[in-house]
């Protein structure tokens, strides 16, 4: 119970205010978290309407990261190294990677974005989450009679506990731990599975994953 109270309100930097970052900023701000958007130009950036929420402010990338205990990275994958380097001192901070290498477009020399982040930041608490479904499902994870599930991985148990809590705060039913850093690439392949079904196989974006047990 004590741990849940500690996780109840967090200071979260969101780097990347496009579809994914914007959807999660809205959900988490509505849940009562303090959202610090990290942007290049605080006077002109995509998603300025996010500032209409009183729990949301905009800062430079380094300042947003410095003010926060949790950092969500939701930028295009090719920028992963540049973005990681721009964060400043990330020692002791949890970094949640929501990026994916799609069709070979990613940080040079890496098979997944999370390894690139680990190699270019001081944080050892890097986990992958919020990358396996579309932004529309982050805006609304509710389907008839059921809420979708999410998944997370990484060696950092602390990071995964925070990602799981934030997934639930965004309205997902559960967020399952699928393993350590060795599962980073598997998570990106899972994202590609959703993209393939939604876009290339014609199922459309309004689909999602749910783990059933019996």
Image: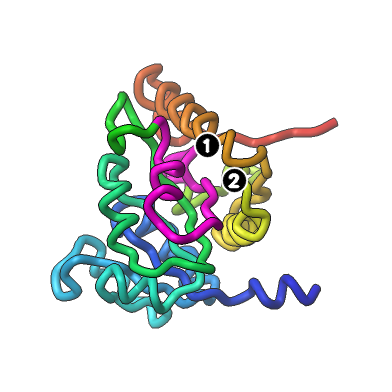
Q: Is residue 212 above or below residue 36?
A: above
- Residue lying at 54% horizontally and 71% vertically, measured from the top left: 31
Based on the picture, tell me whether residue 10 belongs to the magenta stretch. no
Residue marked by disc 1: 184
Q: Is residue 144 above or below residue 33?
A: above
Q: Is residue 206 above or below residue 32?
A: above
Residue 84: % across, % down: 34, 55
Question: Is residue 73 rendered to the left or right of residue 142?
Answer: left
- Residue lying at 54% horizontally and 59% vertically, measured from the top left: 170
Spatial CA distance of label 1 from label 2 is 7 Å
- Residue lying at 33% horizontally and 69% vertically, measured from the top left: 37
Write the start and end of the magenta stretch as one range. Answer: 111-137
Do tag 1 and tag 2 residues touch (Cβ < 8 Å)?
A: yes
Along the line of sight, the residue nearer the viewer: 153 or 35: 153
Along the line of sight, the residue nearer the viewer: 194 or 129: 129
Residue 88: image tag: none
Along the line of sight, the residue nearer the viewer: 161 or 157: 157
- Of labels 1 and 2, earlier in sequence is 2
Along the line of sight, the residue nearer the viewer: 123 or 172: 123
User: Considering the image in quadrants, where does the N terminus appear?
Assistant: bottom right
- Residue lying at 67% horizontally and 55% vertically, measured from the top left: 157
- Extreme residue toward the right, this view: 214
Residue 179: % across, % down: 66, 39
User: Considering the image in quadrants, where does the C terminus appear?
Assistant: top right
Residue 163 position by quadrant: bottom right
Residue 23: % across, % down: 40, 57
Q: Secondary structure at mark 1?
A: helix
Here the colouring is: rainbow
Residue marked by disc 2: 154
Mark 1 surroundings: few (<14), some (14-19) or many (≥20) residues within 10 A:
many
Q: Secondary structure at mark 2?
A: loop
């Amino acid at each position: 119970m004590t741990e849940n109270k500690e996780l109840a309100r967090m200071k979260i930097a969101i780097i990347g205010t496009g579809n994914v970052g914007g959807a999660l900023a809205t959900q988490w701000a509505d849940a009562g978290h303090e959202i610090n958007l990290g942007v290049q130009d605080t006077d002109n950036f995509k998603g300025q309407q996010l500032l209409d929420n009183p729990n949301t402010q905009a800062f430079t990338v380094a300042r947003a990261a410095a003010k926060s205990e949790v950092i969500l990275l939701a930028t295009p994958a090719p920028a992963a190294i540049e973005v990681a380097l721009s964060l400043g001192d990330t020692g002791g901070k949890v970094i949640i990677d929501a990026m994916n290498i799609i069709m070979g477009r990613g940080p040079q020399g890496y098979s997944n974005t999370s390894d690139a982040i680990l190699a270019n930041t001081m944080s050892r608490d890097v986990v992958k989450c919020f990358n396996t479904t579309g932004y529309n499902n982050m805006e609304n994870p509710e389907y008839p009679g059921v809420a979708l599930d999410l998944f997370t991985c990484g060696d950092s148990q602390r990071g995964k506990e925070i990602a799981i809590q934030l997934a639930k705060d965004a309205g997902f039913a559960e967020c399952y731990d699928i393993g350590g850093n060795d599962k980073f690439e598997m998570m990106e392949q899972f994202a590609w599975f959703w993209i393939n079904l939604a876009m290339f196989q014609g199922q459309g974006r309004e689909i999602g994953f749910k783990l059933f047990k019996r």
